[in-house]
Image (cartoon, rainbow, N blue to C red):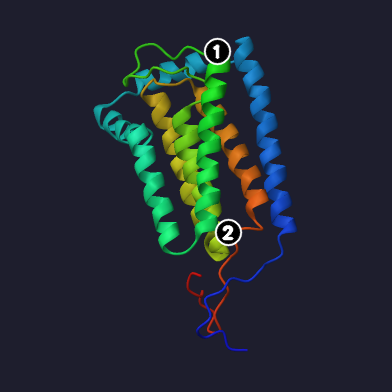
């Protein structure tokens, strides 16, 4: 049957992918809970201190400038600008469900990051190269900007274009790694802060992605093997 002129999406089997998202999300959440207990007990401080010293020894002006650029992406202005632009593009291309799911990931990540920071109330490293006022654990830049926003968008795009899911995931992973490095390089966070932010942020978006699979459908393949337009 010809699909010419159709701009629909097909309903792929959801259960295996959905279950995998949930399993991974719960696994990340469990590891985050263990790490949080270790951080609260002070058992990770020796590792954090060693990493802090290494970042101080490796300080170079070019890397500081690059890290500051990444820092700006995680400011309120940077976050809001990126999310508004991304949601607007999804809405313009008639992918309202995808925009809703991604927005939920970002809001959930921000709310849980803020609540956890207040609960743990960990002191940030001394002599940071950027000014920060909130508590240290987990890293909001990593959890919200890189994981909830970056990885969340990658998961949503992977639902829309499954044949490019690996590319989206690879880009999101690189973004998370760079953001995590920058936060410790600028001495704004301890190493375990960024690890915790990665774990918790990934857990949040994976669980939401599992539930969202039924609402964000991949585009129907056209007769010539290319992807059909947006609906």
Cβ atoms at labels 2 and 1 below 8 Å apart: no
Residue 111 location (% of width, % of height): 53, 30
- Say above or below: 231 vs 54: below
Q: Name the foreground residue: 142 vs 174.
A: 142
Report x, y in % for residue 98: 53, 55
Whether residue 31 sits left or right of residue 58 in the image: it is right
Q: Where residue 1 appears, x then y in whole percent?
A: 63, 89
Give how far apart the Cα atoms at labels 2 and 1 are.
39 Å
Which numbered tag is attached to residue 226?
A: none
Residue in front for this viewpoint, 2 or 195 = 2
Instruction: Identify the residue under disc 1.
Output: 45
The kind of secondary structure element at disc 1 is helix
146 vs 46: above or below: below
Eye-nearest disc, 2 or 1: 2
The answer to whether residue 195 is seen in the rendering is no
N-term mark: 2 or 1: 1
Q: Say if 35 sits above or below 13 in the image.
A: above
Q: Is residue 14 left or right of residue 122?
A: right
x%, y% of residue 2? 58, 88
Residue annotated with mark 2: 159
């Amino acid at each position: 049957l010809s699909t010419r002129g159709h701009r629909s999406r097909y309903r792929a089997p959801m259960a295996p992918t959905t279950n995998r998202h949930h399993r991974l999300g719960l696994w990340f959440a469990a590891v985050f809970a263990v790490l949080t207990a270790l951080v609260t007990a002070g058992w990770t401080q020796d590792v954090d201190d060693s990493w802090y010293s290494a970042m101080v020894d490796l300080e170079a002006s070019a890397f500081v400038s690059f890290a500051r650029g990444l820092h700006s992406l995680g400011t309120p202005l940077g976050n809001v600008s990126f999310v508004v632009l991304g949601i607007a593009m999804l809405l313009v291309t008639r992918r309202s469900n995808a925009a809703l799911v991604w927005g939920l990931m970002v809001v959930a990540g921000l709310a849980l990051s803020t609540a956890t920071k207040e609960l743990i109330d960990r002191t940030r490293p001394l002599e940071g190269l950027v000014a920060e006022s909130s508590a240290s654990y987990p890293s909001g830049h990593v959890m919200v900007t890189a994981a909830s926003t970056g990885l969340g968008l990658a998961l949503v795009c992977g639902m829309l274009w499954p044949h490019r899911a690996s590319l989206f995931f690879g880009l999101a992973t690189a973004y998370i790694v760079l953001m995590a490095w920058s936060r410790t390089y600028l001495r704004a966070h301890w190493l375990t802060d960024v690890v915790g932010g990665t774990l918790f942020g990934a857990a949040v978006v994976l669980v939401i992605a599992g539930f969202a699979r039924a609402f964000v459908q991949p585009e129907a393949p056209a007769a010539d093997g290319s992807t059909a337009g947006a609906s």
